Image (cartoon, grey):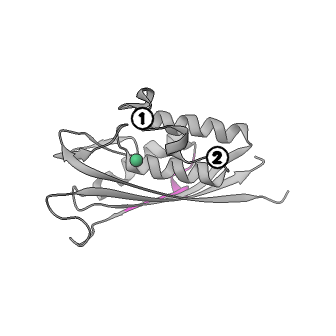
Amino acid sequence: MLRNFAFGFGFDIHPLVEGRKLKIGGVEIPSSVGPLGHSDGDALLHALTDAMLSASGFPDIGTLFPDNDPAYKDIDSTLLLEKTLSLLKEKGYRVYQVDLTLILDKPKISPYYEKIKANLSGLLNLPMGKIGLKARTSEGLLFPPEKPAIIAFSLVVLEENF
Ligand code: MG
C-alpha cells in the first residue's frame, strides 16, 4: 500500500529567568535559569506538539491549550504532548519522524542529547534513529546577556491512515 505522509513545522521561544527549572524534551537539565511560561515552558515539546497539530489539521497549541486557562498552569508539557498524540491517533495518524533544533547560549545541551532522545523515543513510540536533535548557540547574536532565551524548531513527519 502506498504510504501517505503529512508534514508539520513548529517554533517556540521562551525567556530564561532565574528560579525556574529548565526542562527540554521532558528532561530536566541543570541550569541557573529556566523558561518563563504558563506551563513548565518546555520549548522543545511545545514546538514538537505544534508541528504535530499543524501536520494533522488541528488548531495550534495556544488555541487547544490556552495559557489563560488555569488547568494548564505549570502543567508538565509531556501531558500536552500525550493529549496531542491521542488526538492524532483518533484521526489515523502516527508520528513517523521528527527533527528538532534548539538555539540557546547556555547551558550546553549536547551532553543531554541521548537522554532527551530516549525520553522522546518513549513518549512518541519512535526509534531513536527517527529522532534528530541538535542545539546551537546564537554566537551571542540573538540574546543580550541579561535577557537569555531558548528557541526551538521542529519538523514532524506523520504517517496517515496508519
Ligand atoms: Mg511555549
Residue extending farthest to the right is: 1
Q: Nearer the viewer, residue 84 or 146?
A: 146
Disc 2 versus disc 1: nearer the observer: 1
Alpha carbon separation for disc pair 2 and 1? 20 Å
Q: Which residues are magenta?
A: 126-134
Left or right of 138? Residue 12 is right
State whether residue 144 is above or below residue 115: below
**SS at mark 1?**
loop
The amino acid marked with disc number 1 is Asn
- Residue at image position (41%, 27%) is 70
Is residue 117 among what the camera can see? no
- Image-quadrant location for residue 29: top left
Residue wearing tag 2: 58
Residue extending farthest to the top is: 71
The amino acid marked with disc number 2 is Phe
The count of marks equals 2
- Residue at image position (54%, 35%) is 82
